């Protein structure tokens, strides 16, 4: 049976509900999103539903994590469609605040995770993680979840949030969930919507090069420079690839770049396909 999720737009209302649920002894699972939901988001929702009495999802395109030159204005939005998905997935509450509700006049407090945000996406998207940690901290304070679900598609984000929660002694269990791909390997992303038919084909360069590098690793290649070179040669062969922003092989905990690859390391990359910036990663 499908169930209508309760939509909440006010912070005080959300807090009241979560306090009540806690009093009743119910566990709360939380899935923060920016909406335009796809199978990646759905997998997080399903995890949360399995492991908690109540599942809350937030839909908020957070302007503070976009730089002025990024895609905030054209970021895909479709609340009715998202709500339909939440209904099908049996989400209990959808927290859907406005910008003014989240960032009233005179807002001036931020959360910064220092080291983990210095490389990978953090090196290219200035202020991005400051925006992410700040909004997630706020959302955690509002929803008060027992468990919060993050996708390993955004591996750095997952580790940064985990660090924040540890460092600030927050009572939230951060759960990392597997990266979900299309059948042909493309990592699901709301931004895939930007891709033309031709670009969609070239977007496969990310996953294909990651799978290839993993294969080379399995066959004994440990030299990071060689692995990166093989990957970039492969990627640049796709016609719609404009630029490789980075390819890095990093330690899964510190996210520091490696010279020699080891089992467990993460290969992460960001590539411009046309004007769309795509990211992907794989664990060795
Ligand atoms: P958004 O990009 O909407 O992603 C919401 C959650 O879905 C994140 O935890 C992300 O890692 C996960 N996700 C996206 N694509 C996925 C895929 N293919 N497989 C598995 N999980 C996937 O990430 C954000 O929003 C924002 O930064 C947010 C955390 C909500 C803060 O604003």
Image (tube, rainbow, N blue to C red):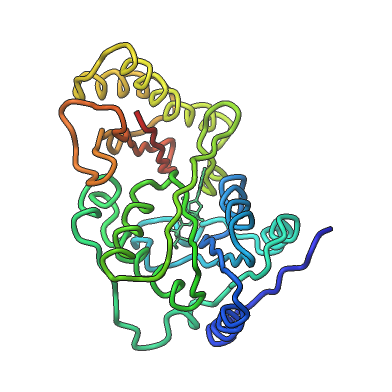
The residue furthest top is 219
Compare residues 122 and 13 and report the one nearer the observer. Answer: 13
**42 over 63 or under it: above or below:** above
At 15% from the left and 28% from the top, the residue drawn is 259
Compare residues 146 and 136 and report the one nearer the observer. Answer: 146
Compare residues 270 and 275 and report the one nearer the observer. Answer: 270
Residue 7 lies left or right of residue 40; in this view the side is right
On the image, the x and y values in percent for residue 218 come to: 34, 16
Q: Give the mark count.
A: 0
At 81% from the left and 59% from the top, the residue drawn is 2
The residue furthest right is 1
Residue 183 lies left or right of residue 274; in this view the side is right
Locate residue 52: give its quadrant: bottom right
Q: Quadrant of the C terminus?
A: top left
At 54% from the left and 64% from the top, the residue drawn is 30
Locate residue 115: give its quadrant: bottom left
**227 over 87 or under it: above or below:** above
On the image, the x and y values in percent for residue 57 come to: 58, 65
On the image, the x and y values in percent for residue 71 come to: 44, 56
On the image, the x and y values in percent for residue 280 come to: 41, 37
């Amino acid at each position: 049976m499908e169930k209508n999720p309760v939509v909440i737009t006010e912070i005080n209302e959300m807090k009241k509900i979560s306090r009540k649920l806690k009093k009743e002894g119910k566990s709360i699972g939380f899935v923060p999103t920016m909406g335009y939901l796809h199978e990646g988001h759905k997998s997080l929702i399903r995890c949360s539903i399995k492991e908690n009495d109540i599942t809350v999802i937030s839909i908020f395109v957070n302007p503070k994590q976009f730089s002025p030159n990024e895609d905030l204005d054209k970021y895909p939005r479709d609340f009715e469609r998202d709500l339909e998905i939440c209904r099908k997935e049996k989400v209990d509450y959808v927290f859907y605040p406005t910008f003014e509700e989240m960032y009233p006049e005179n807002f001036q407090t931020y959360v910064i995770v220092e080291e983990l945000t210095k490389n990978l996406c953090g090196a290219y998207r200035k202020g991005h993680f400051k925006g992410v940690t700040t909004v997630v901290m706020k959302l955690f304070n509002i929803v008060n979840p027992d468990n919060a679900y993050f996708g390993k598609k955004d591996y750095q984000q997952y580790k940064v949030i985990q660090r924040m929660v540890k460092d600030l002694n927050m009572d939230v269990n951060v759960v990392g969930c597997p990266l979900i791909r299309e059948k042909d390997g493309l990592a699901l992303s709301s931004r895939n919507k930007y891709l033309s038919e031709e670009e969609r084909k070239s977007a496969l360069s990310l996953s294909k090069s990651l799978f290839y590098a993993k294969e080379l690793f399995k066959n004994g290649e440990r030299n990071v420079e060689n692995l990166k070179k093989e990957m970039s040669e492969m990627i640049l062969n796709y016609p719609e690839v404009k630029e490789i922003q980075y390819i890095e092989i990093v330690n899964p905990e510190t996210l520091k770049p490696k010279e020699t690859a080891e089992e467990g390391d993460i290969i992460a990359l960001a590539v411009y396909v046309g004007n769309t910036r795509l990211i992907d990663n794989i664990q060795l």
